Image (spheres, rainbow, N blue to C red):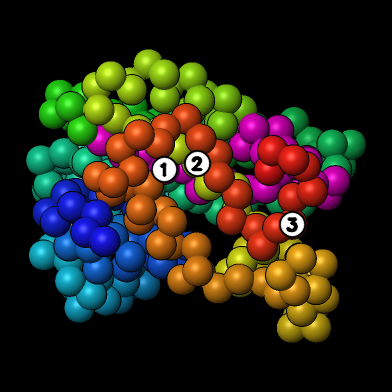
Amino acid sequence: MDLELRNRVALVTGASSGLGKACALALAAEGARVAVAARRRDALETVAAQARECGAPEARAFAVDLADADSIGTLMREVNGAFGGVDILIANGGGPKPGTVTQTSLADRDAAYQTLLRSMLQLVDGTLPHMRRQHWGRIVALTSTSVKQPIATLALSNMFRTALISALKTLSGEVARDGVTVNAIATGRILTDRLSSLYGGADEIAAAGREVPIGRVAQPDEFAPLVAFLCGEPARYITGQTIAIDGGLISGLFG
């Protein structure tokens, strides 16, 4: 299937490894021009080179700290200046510290608000005007299954990722007639640095995988194809959705 993404400009944050990297390479394979952003510039340069090898006509690395609003502002100026605007935004970032509500402080909540909600909306603010002007755009936020089924030990994720989903659902209705779609992915147990930090060693990760109906954790490259599809022209009638990629982990009927 041709997703018709040749020469579309895609900005992927959190792209130095894991899900962000997998999404960047999937879009590159569809012929998109790719801007990869994260804190680790050395790792990003490697990802940019891999994106070019996958088929991206152009791929550049940009440093950003999603915990710093000024850094995000600089990123948007640099990316828009280099590419003339962003057609596709993959809004992705790291997860907050684990803990229950009573174990988190006001400072923890402020930090999580910045990284999980404010930063994502700032990225949208920096890309949406171009999308609306050209009457075409794609926004896909990578979140967590916590937005569909709260996770007891990830209270900060439950709080602020859910708020992000509410904001994006509202936005999707505002921009639908501008040709801009807005969707989110509720990420399950996928083998990333984040999963390793939460579960520990290989035995613990394997045990976490056995709790999934499919019986294992996923690899990032099993996640990226749906993200690429949502960015393509064939997905132009899909908007305002939060789709779980979780191996059947969420138990609710509307997961």
- Examine the rendered structure and indicate whether residue 155 appears above or below residue 14: above
- Write down the quadrant of residue 247 in the picture: bottom right
- Examine the rendered structure and indicate whether residue 254 appears above or below residue 163: below
- Write down the quadrant of residue 40 in the picture: bottom left
Q: Residues within 10 Å of mark 1 (few under 14, many from 20)?
A: many
In this figure, which residue is indicated by the disc labeled 3? 249
- The answer to whether residue 69 shows anywhere in this view is no
In this figure, which residue is indicated by the disc labeled 2? 184
In this figure, which residue is indicated by the disc labeled 1? 140
Is label 3 or label 1 in front?
3
Tell me the kind of residue under disc 1.
Answer: Val
Left or right: where does residue 233 sit relative to residue 121?
Answer: left
Q: Residues within 10 Å of mark 3 (few under 14, many from 20)?
A: some
Q: Residues within 10 Å of mark 2 (few under 14, many from 20)?
A: many
Tell me the kind of residue under disc 3.
Answer: Leu
Q: Residue at x 37, y 16 (%)?
A: 174
CB-based contact (under 8 Å), mark 2 and mark 1 = yes
The span picked out in magenta is: 137-162
- Spatial CA distance of label 3 from label 1 is 21 Å
Near-viewer residue (2 or 187): 2
Is label 3 or label 2 in front?
3
